[in-house]
Image (cartoon, helix red, strand yellow):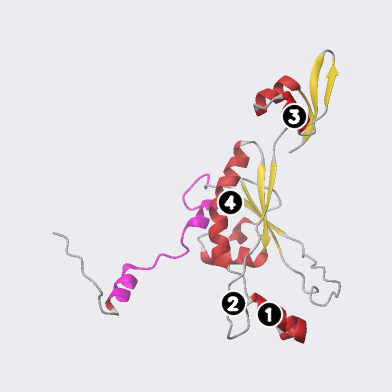
Amino acid sequence: MPIGNIELEAALERTGISERKLLDSGFSMSRRGGVKYVEDFPIGAPLVVEVMTSSISGGNKKKRTTVAQAFEDAILGGVDAHVAPGINYRQVWARMVSQLIVKSEASVSWGGKTIWVLQDVLADYISSSTALDLQGFLSEYTSEVNILSFSYGGAYRGSGDGIAELDLGELFAGPIRPPGATSEQGFQDMIRAPVVPPRSSLTRALASKRSTNIIVIP
């Protein structure tokens, strides 16, 4: 949040904490014109930055793609000798989706914004596995929901200094709910399925194997 000077009474009213607590938290006080002020107090609209880290899959011991095995192979045989485990997209997405909407709504209600920072491969997964195509939300300006997507540059492997250079990111921004016609998209579509299979798919799955139990409803 931006910081500035605010009257002590206003700071106490906004926070519900005591003057002593503000002093214990490191704030400085000043007096101007007989009025007591708190210096460098958080004021204005907040900007929330959420960095979405990507957890990895468990790996396959037979293919030596667990974290420990990949590390061993990289140390003993060099960078090109190991096969690293992949990103567990589904688990990452499950942790992210509800927070994305709720935290964005909270920031908007406070007059601010939330910006999510994530890797491009996760953004691609969102577009392919939900009803929302992020490419339709490329923007130069922030909105109610904001996703900033970065990728690792192709020069990372050969840089030699261990520093991962990030390519220029893309900003995907748009409303939580479509403002007008139902044909418009909003970020709430991220929790919708990209395709709903016909009921015949379920029937075919049930009919393709022997029933284990039958429930009789009187």
- Dot 3 crowding, Cα within 10 Å, few <14, some 14–19, many 20+: some
Residue 171, percent from left and from top: 69, 56
- Give the mark nearest the N terminus, 3 or 2: 3
**Front position among marks 2 and 4:** 2
Q: Which residue is mark 1?
A: 70
Question: Which range is magenta?
Answer: 178-206
- Check the image and report above or below for 19 versus 67: above
Q: Earlier in the sequence, mark 3 or mark 4?
A: 3
Give the residue at mark 3.
22
Q: Nearer the viewer, residue 109 or 164?
A: 164
Element at badge 1? Answer: helix
Q: Quadrant of the N terminus?
A: top right
Which numbered disc, 3 or 2, marks the residue closer to the eye? Answer: 3
- Magenta stretch contains residue 56: no
Looking at the image, can residue 158 be seen?
yes
In the rendered view, tell whether residue 35 sits above or below residue 92. above
Is residue 193 covered in magenta? Answer: yes
Crowding at mark 4 (Cα within 10 Å: few <14, some 14-19, many 20+)? many
For the residues labelled 2 and 4, the Cα–Cα distance comes to 28 Å
User: Is the C-beta separation of discs 3 and 1 under 8 Å?
Assistant: no
Image coordinates for residue 71, horizontal then vertical, percent = 71, 78
Per the model, the C-alpha gap separating discs 1 and 2 is: 9 Å
Q: Are marks 1 and 2 in contact (CB under 8 Å)?
A: yes
The residue identified by callout 4 is 100
The reply to whether callout 2 and callout 4 are in contact (CB within 8 Å) is: no
- At label 2, the amino acid type is Gly
